[in-house]
Image (spheres, grey):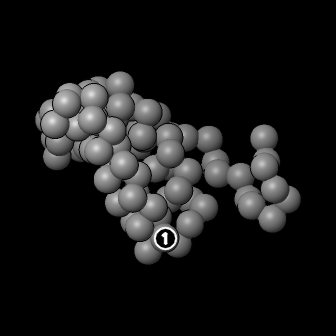
Amino acid sequence: MTAHRWIPEAPAPDGAWMRGFTSRLLEMRPDLPVFTARHMAPQAFAAMHLLSPAEAAELWDERMLATNRAWRGLAGR
């Protein structure tokens, strides 16, 4: 499914890449729920193919900040 004609579609996610990404993310953030890490992997894979490295990193930083705030809010911190 393509949202806009000018946005190219990302290739199908590579299972090995996504498992490695999820494992690395959980190594970096052991307190992160596995479900959340698995949910982020396909988004990161698509961003890697659709955006420049700088744009993908900036978007990822914003996403992680929002996720951290949401989890802190749920934890009552």
Whole-percent x, y for residue 70 in the image: 33, 38
Please report the residue visible at 81 percent of the width from the left and 65 percent of the height from the top. Answer: 6
* 15 up-or-down from 60: above or below: above
| The N terminus - image quarter | top right
Picture quadrant of residue 4: bottom right
Please report the residue visible at 40 percent of the width from the left and 52 percent of the height from the top. Answer: 63
Picture quadrant of residue 24: top left
Q: Is residue 47 left or right of residue 70?
A: right
Whole-percent x, y for residue 13 in the image: 55, 40
Q: Which residue is at the front of the view, 67 or 8?
A: 67
Q: Circle 1 sits in a helix, a strand or a loop, which is it?
A: helix
Please report the residue visible at 85 percent of the width from the left and 59 percent of the height from the top. Answer: 5
Q: Which residue is at the front of the view, 66 or 60?
A: 66
The crowd level at tag 1 (other Cα within 10 Å; few <14, some 14-19, many 20+) is: few
Please report the residue visible at 62 percent of the width from the left and 41 percent of the height from the top. Answer: 12
Q: Which residue is at the front of the view, 5 or 19?
A: 5
Q: Amino acid at mark 1?
A: Glu
Q: Which residue is at the front of the view, 5 or 68?
A: 68
Q: Which residue corresponds to mark 1?
A: 55
Whole-percent x, y for residue 41 in the image: 42, 41
Query: Would you say residue 23 is visible in this rendering?
Result: no
| The C terminus - image quarter | top left
